[in-house]
Image (cartoon, rainbow, N blue to C red):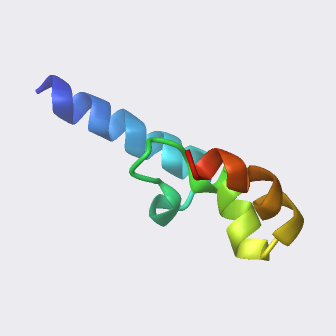
Amino acid sequence: MLENYFISKFLSIFEMFDLKKELLAPCGLYCGVCRIYKAHRDNDLKFKKEILPTLND
């Protein structure tokens, strides 16, 4: 019961803010605000080079 309540609240938030469900990432973040996602989408090579050292650890 409680699980259904939270799911319905979660979905209503998506509708309220017109968020795209396909941009809800497995990491728990919303890709629409994720800088790494935006760098990939926009092919931001400068940012990709900046974060590369942190991804190789």
Q: In which quarter of the image is residue 43?
A: bottom right
Quadrant housing residue 3: top left
Residue 44 position in % (x across, y down) = 83, 69
Q: Quadrant of the N terminus?
A: top left
For the point 70% across and 56% down, which residue is it?
A: 52
Residue that lies at the very extreme toward the left in this rendered image: 1
Residue 8 sits above or below residue 21 on the image: above
Q: Residue at x 69, y 70 (%)?
A: 40
Question: Quick check: 10 left or right of 17?
Answer: left
**Which residue is nearer to you in this view: 47 or 32?**
47
- The residue closer to the viewer here, 13 or 24, is 24
User: Between 54 and 36, which is closer to the camera in this rendering?
Assistant: 54
Across and down, in percent, residue 57 comes to 55, 44
Residue 8 at x, y percent in the picture: 31, 39
Across the whole image, how many numbered discs are drawn on residues?
A: 0
Q: Tell me where residue 4 appears, x and y as whole percent.
A: 19, 35
Residue in the image at 67% along x and 50% along y: 34
Residue 2 vertical placement versus 56 (above, below): above
